[in-house]
Amino acid sequence: MKYESMTNEELKKNLSVEKKRYDGFLKEKLALDMSRGKPAAEQLDLSAPLLSALTKDVKFPKGQDYRNYGLLDGIPELKKLFAELFGIPEEYVFIGGNSSLNLMYDMISDAMLTGVLGSTPWVKLPGKVKFICPVPGYDRHFNICEKLGIEMLSVPMNESGPDMDIVEELVRTDPSIKGIWCVPRFSNPGGVVYSDEVVRRLAKMKTAAPDFRIYYDNSYFVHTLSDDAPELLNIFDVAKEAGTEDRIYMFASTSKITFAGSGVSMIAASPKNIASIKEKMGWKTIGFNKVWQYAHYLYLQSKEHVLAIMKEQAKLIRPKFDVVLDAFDKAFGDSSTVTWNAPKGGYFICLKCMNGTAKKIWNLCKKVGLTITPAGASHPLHNDDSDSYLRIAPTYPSLEDLKKATDVLVTVVKIVTIETLLAAQ
């Protein structure tokens, strides 16, 4: 509905209708949650065979005993599988525990304390370390920087990725900028897939800091919702040609492929970086869970089987995205005041409302019993200057709960939008 072209009387009439709906929701004493991008139980059930992969008569490969110490960088079978998925050499792969976010934190905290390939530890530098943060972006990335005292420089996300004109100018002139956060395929929350040009420019750009790194969080690399989802150019291929392979740390995990709380994670990096990662990891741990890594290998098997698993995941997830997108289109399809993306993969929808309304929407949702991600979470320090972005996570609720939650959200957005328009008249 095109509220911005309505008369004052029409707006008031619509507002009265929506407020009555809202009052009805208040009486229902709802408890709905679409705040995080968690897999639903039905998705987790798909991976039940993983639990029986290690039978009592399972035969482990000859050689290194996976039940014992050793193989700090992971079992070769799983390294080979990740290498196949990403189109990289096996020697570029380091397998970790269940959390890729943990690996990201480790890499940055290690750089703070011990430096990067012999560079000065960031904590010993005279000024503040800075990171580029494309926005809207992933709140947990920003939390790492905040807690480690890293200054965050917000750069807008376009339909093809971060604004590279701004990124290139920043890293070319400022040696205190040591990194950039990237979610290159189905970004969180905007669902953006970086274009070939953006990937090339990231790999080839000139940086004032020799220890500058791209923290390439490829979390949703196989998480497609449609068969025509755009592919992502292999950044390691481009970097190898440009001589910048050491610049890239790529992260991924099986958290949304198998079990969210107990998958396996990965860092992909140049051989020089991998050697450094192994040395530093050896200070912290004897090794990760190789028995569970082997169970994952037995279940996942091959790139083709992983993609087949993800098609089954998409069958469960896609209808939920359709519920939200159809509701938004019906309510705001001809409006310029409320916009959103229609992702072809990943876990989120980014809803952009009128400036100055996101916090009001979040508060009204909370009051009526609907939990959504807090306004501002998609920006460093929760500071969205426009107060307009909201991250919507459709995957976790049941279809029935999701329909109700979406109904509530749409009603609240209508109320706040109309009130804002009336106040401006």
Image: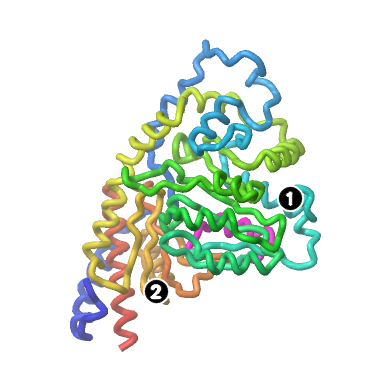
Vertical placement of 277 versus 148: above or below? above
Q: Can you give x and y, in whole percent of width and height, for residue 303 in the image?
A: 44, 31
Mark 1 burial class by Cα count in 10 Å: few <14, some 14-19, many 20+:
many
Residue type at tag 1: Val
Residue type at tag 2: Thr
Residue 1 among magenta residues: no
Kindly state the secondary structure of the residue where label 1 is placed.
loop
Q: Which residue is mark 2?
A: 357
Residue 216 is labelled as none
Vertical placement of 37 versus 71: above or below? below
Which one is in front, 168 or 229?
168
**Cα distance between the residues tagged 2 and 1:** 42 Å
Name the residue furthest bottom: 425
Q: Quadrant of the C terminus?
A: bottom left
Q: Can you give x and y, in whole percent of width and height, for residue 77 in the image?
A: 56, 25
**Residue occupying image coordinates x 27% and y 60%:** 407
Drawn side of residue 161 relative to residue 224, left or right: right
Q: Can you give x and y, in whole percent of width and height, for residue 217 in the image?
A: 54, 49
Q: Which residue is mark 1?
A: 116
Q: Earlier in the sequence, mark 2 or mark 1?
A: 1
Q: Can you give x and y, in whole percent of width and height, for residue 236 in the image?
A: 57, 45
Mark 2 burial class by Cα count in 10 Å: few <14, some 14-19, many 20+:
many
Q: Which residues are magenta?
A: 136-151
Kindly state the secondary structure of the residue where label 2 is placed.
loop
Which one is in front, 120 or 354?
120
